[in-house]
Image (spheres, rainbow, N blue to C red):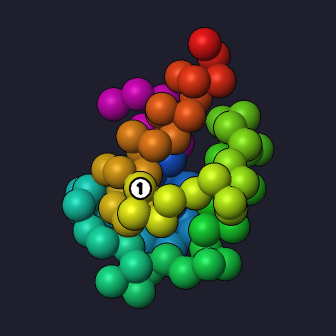
Amino acid sequence: MTHVHQTVLRILGQVTSTPELANEMDTDLYDAGLLDSLGLVNLMLAFSDELGVTIYPSDLDKKEWATPRRMIADVERRLAAAAA
């Protein structure tokens, strides 16, 4: 598990108050009622603070953040693009 993977899961667990999401990587966060617009903003701020990745609401495709697995992949992609 990479540093980014661990950090995203830790922050996601804090924002959703559901730390067991690390074991449920394909849970639909919206359908389960774990994530809403305020939660998304909190995630974006925390990812910026801890990972240095800036994500604007206008750049976010909610489908890409529907599950923990997709969210991790999107954050990793953004970090890789920023480093290139």
Q: Main secondary structure of the magenta part?
A: helix
Residue 21 in sight: yes
Residue 18, placed above or below residue 8? below
Q: Can you give x and y, in whole percent of width and height, for residue 30 in the image?
A: 40, 79
Left or right, 47 with reference to 11: right
- Pointer 1 residue: 64
Asked if 21 appears above or below 37 in the picture, the reply is above
Q: Give the range drawn in magenta.
A: 1-7
Secondary element under disc 1, as helix, strand or loop, is helix
At x 33% / y 31%, what residue is drawn? Answer: 1
Q: Which picture quadrant has residue 19?
A: bottom left
**Left or right: 17, with 53 as reference point:** left
Say what amino acid the circle numbered 1 marks.
Glu
Residue 13 appearing in the image: no
Q: Which corner quadrant of the image does residue 53 belong to?
A: top right
Determine if the magenta segment contains residue 3: yes
Q: Quadrant of the C terminus?
A: top right
